[in-house]
Amino acid sequence: MVELKPGDFFCTDGTGGLSRVITWFERMRAKDGRAEFCHCGTIIDSVGKTIESLATIRYGHISDYAGRKVLIGRWRGMTPQGHAEGVKAISDDIGQIYPFWRLPLHALGIAWISSGKFQVCSERVAQHLIVAGFDDIGKWEGQNPDDIADMIRRWRDVEIVFDGTWQKETR
């Protein structure tokens, strides 16, 4: 059984056309030449409620990914206050449409150009962590799901909470 904590963050794979395109572009720009995830989100409570950028910026649940490959990370420095500030920063625009126009910037490798409040899923995860106090990330602009997955797997201040196929009873 996986014990989730507020502030955990996740990456997941996808099988649709857009998912494959996102992963292909990530792989082309990845330092290690590998990428397997096309989506990210932030877990905001211990029962698995999430904030995500999908067709709109919205709340979801980690159980929505049952049967899919999921990687969950936890920044060791997360505090309740930091998490609350991070959630406030990324939840102001719940209901807003997904910024599809930013995807070409990611494909061209110039997504670091400021986007104001318009963030793809991985940029939203990075912003939550930065506002919570995880300064090592630098800028949230330009972060992609592969960057977030690499952070979970390789950064010493982040631990792997779960890595595998998510099942409804995993929680």
Image (spheres, rainbow, N blue to C red):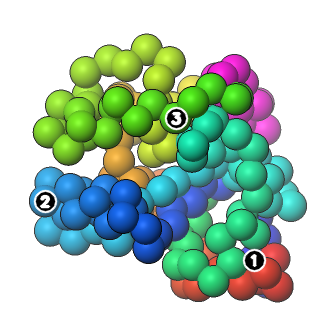
Secondary structure mainly formed by the magenta segment: helix
Q: Is residue 33 magenta?
A: no
Query: In this view of the protein, which residue sits in the foreground, 142 or 94?
Result: 94
Q: Quadrant of residue 52?
A: top right
**x, y percent for residue 22:** 31, 56
Amino acid type at mark 3: Tyr
Q: Secondary structure at mark 3?
A: loop
Foreground mark, 3 or 1? 3
Residue at the image position 70 percent from the left and 39 percent from the top? 58
18, above or below 12, in the image: above
**x, y percent for residue 106:** 25, 40
Can residue 93 be seen by looking at this rendering? yes
Point out which mark residue 2 bears. Answer: 1
Q: Earlier in the sequence, mark 3 or mark 1?
A: 1
Amino acid type at mark 1: Val
Query: In this view of the protein, which residue sits in the foreground, 75 or 40?
Result: 40
